[in-house]
Image: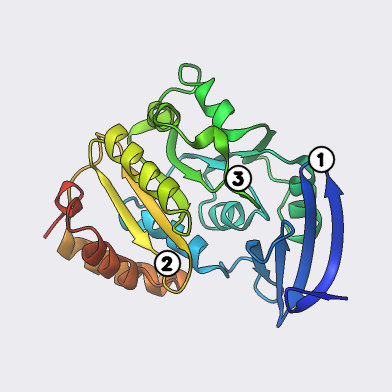
């Protein structure tokens, strides 16, 4: 059976809807009943980041060489978690996923390992963060937000209060990384305003080419202003190491953020 122009290898339902896994040209993908891919994995190279928007979410590496702890909201097939576990052996990850069935599929079909460095909590990500502004204050070097379903961004994340709570969970030099759908312009504009307010305009956006995604990067008050020449050298080294298009990310940061670039990058 074929769906989304690919071979359907799994289909199931839970209380929140349908889950489908398809394969095409050596790539396995997770869908929530729509054409949009929630996660993808190369069967030949399981650690490689297939989706352009997930690669763009690694652009934090331009600004931070390593990290100790990270929070991932929206596990999906686990491609970002696998990337972090693979490349940062000393890291500790907390992942919040709303659907238990998604975690099971990430384990059974996308190679998410049982690893003591990864703690997974089944919960609503927005609620989890807002309830832990004291107990997890300044806990995380990085927070990744990628909580989407077939209807878009999780409703519990749609407020300035949520982004204020995210900031409280970040270390002073921490970075928040947020996947946004530009196809929902009112919500995109609202999120941009919330980020700008919560992080005092220390925000950059990275539009993913030929996709409906833009990745937001918000920098806590303890992050420095970065020198562009040093970032250029770092981007080339990162591209060679990870085989990800970091020089292109840096060029796009400079092109797409004329109003806020000097809050983060000094030319």
At 65% from the left and 73% from the top, the residue drawn is: 45
Label 1 residue SS: loop
Could you say which disc has been placed on residue 34 in the image?
none
Q: In this figure, which residue is indicated by the disc labeled 2?
A: 208
Residue ID for mark 1: 15
The residue that disc 3 covers is 74
The structure residue drawn at horizontal position 17% and vertical position 53%, both measured from the top left corner, is 259
Q: Measure the C-alpha gap from mark 3 to mark 1.
A: 17 Å
Q: Is residue 36 left or right of residue 134?
A: right
Place residue 27 in its image quadrant.
bottom right
* Front of the two marks 2 and 1: 1
35 and 105: which one is in front? 35
Is tag 2's residue or tag 3's residue first in the polypeptide sequence? 3
Q: Secondary structure at mark 2?
A: loop
Q: Earlier in the sequence, mark 3 or mark 1?
A: 1
Residue at image location 48% in from the left, 69% down from the top: 211
Q: Quadrant of residue 21?
A: bottom right
**Taking 77 as reference, is 200 left or right?**
left
């Amino acid at each position: 059976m074929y769906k989304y122009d690919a071979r359907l290898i799994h289909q199931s339902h839970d209380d929140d809807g349908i889950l489908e896994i398809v394969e095409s040209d050596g790539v396995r993908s997770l869908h929530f009943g729509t054409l949009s891919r929630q996660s993808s994995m190369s069967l030949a190279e399981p650690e490689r980041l297939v989706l352009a928007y997930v690669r763009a979410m690694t652009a934090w590496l331009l600004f931070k060489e390593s990290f100790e702890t990270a929070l991932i909201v929206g596990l999906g097939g686990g491609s970002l978690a696998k990337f972090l576990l693979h490349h940062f052996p000393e890291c500790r990850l907390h992942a919040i996923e709303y659907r238990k069935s998604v975690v099971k599929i990430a384990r059974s079909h996308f190679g998410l390992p049982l690893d003591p460095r990864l703690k997974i909590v089944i919960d609503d990500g927005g609620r989890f963060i807002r309830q832990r502004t004291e107990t997890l204050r300044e806990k995380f070097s990085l927070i990744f937000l990628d909580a989407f379903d077939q209807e878009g961004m999780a409703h519990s994340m749609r407020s300035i209060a949520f982004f204020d709570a995210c900031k409280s969970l970040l270390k002073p030099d921490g970075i928040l990384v947020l996947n946004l759908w530009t196809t929902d312009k009112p919500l995109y504009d609202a999120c941009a305003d919330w980020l700008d307010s919560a992080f005092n305009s220390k925000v950059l956006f990275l539009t993913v080419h030929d996709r409906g995604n833009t990745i937001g990067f918000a920098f806590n008050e303890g992050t420095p202003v970065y020198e562009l020449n040093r970032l250029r050298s770092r981007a080339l080294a990162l591209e060679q190491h990870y085989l990800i298009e970091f020089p292109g990310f840096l060029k796009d940061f400079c092109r797409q953020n004329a109003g806020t670039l000097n809050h983060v990058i000094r030319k």
